[in-house]
Image: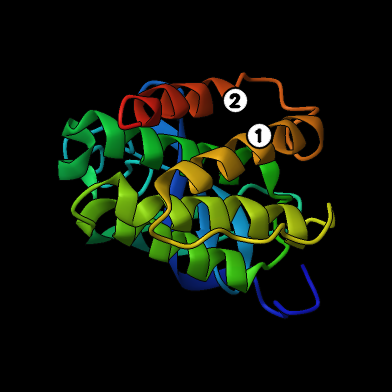
Amino acid sequence: MTPTEPDDAEASREAIVCAVRPHGETAVIVRLLTAQSGLVAAYVAGGRGRQLRPVLIPGNSVAAEWRARSESQLPFARIELAASRAPFLTEPLPAAAIDWATALTAAALPERQPFPALHEALSALLDAVCHAPSARGWLPAMVSYEALLLRDLGYGAPPPFPPRGDFSANLALLDRLGPALARYPLATCRSDVMAARALLRERLGRME
């Protein structure tokens, strides 16, 4: 238990689904970002079934209730959909942005350490990706989120941000942040999370 969570054996939180991994025949291990508890991994029975599969999609906002008998036990979670971003996954560029933002979060953040500013920023970024007319509207939010993540994990202050409307300058800053992400928070990651970023960068490059 963290100092900010005196009774984390049973908790109910608003959360963002960041990663889902199959477990057994029908269950999944889900990684959720909450404002109060940070990144939480939990076991969801039936997570691969027809009812929960559309809910447990990275990028979706959910209401999650979990409980564990001890600190060392993976909690069991019950999940209800709060807001679906699945319809935007049919578009290549928004899909790549959502995939990268959630994969980065799941891979980079330590578990059970609250980062409320990152939770708020990720929620705003996902909303921007889904509702901005084009990537020109949400690219500054993506750059800001990456810089904020690096800062909150202790890897330096954010660089000066270019004007929001300057697409080329924001894209150049995105390129500058990539090596720092690979070298620091993702250095020990077992999966190639940066591949999702490479796909996003390729699709953004087509807009130049």
Question: Tag 1 or tag 2, which sits nearer the N-term?
Answer: 1
Question: Residue 206's spot in the image, x, y percent?
Answer: 32, 24
Q: Secondary structure at mark 1?
A: helix
Count neighbours of disc 1 (C-alpha within 10 A) and say few if under 14, some if 14 to 19, many if 20 or more.
Answer: some
Q: Residue at x 28, y 60 (%)?
A: 80
- Compare residues 125 and 133 and report the one nearer the observer: 133
- Compare residues 126 and 25 and report the one nearer the observer: 126
Q: Secondary structure at mark 2?
A: helix
Q: Is residue 72 left or right of residue 146?
A: right
Q: Is residue 99 left or right of residue 153?
A: left
Q: Quadrant of residue 176?
A: top right
In this rendering, the answer to whether 176 lies above or below 72 is: above
**Quadrant occupied by the C terminus:** top left
In this rendering, the answer to whether 162 lies above or below 97 is: below
Residue 9's label in the rendered image is none
Point out the frontmost of discs 2 and 1: 1
The residue wearing badge 1 is 178
Q: Residue at x 70, y 77 (%)?
A: 5
**Quadrant occupied by the N terminus:** bottom right
Amino acid at dot 1: Gly
Q: Residue at x 42, y 21 (%)?
A: 202
Q: Residue at x 30, y 32 (%)?
A: 207
Question: Residue 152's spot in the image, x, y percent?
Answer: 75, 62
How far apart are labels 2 and 1 at the CA level?
8 Å
Q: Are dots 2 and 1 in contact, CB under 8 Å?
A: yes
The residue wearing badge 2 is 194
Question: Residue 154's spot in the image, x, y percent?
Answer: 84, 57
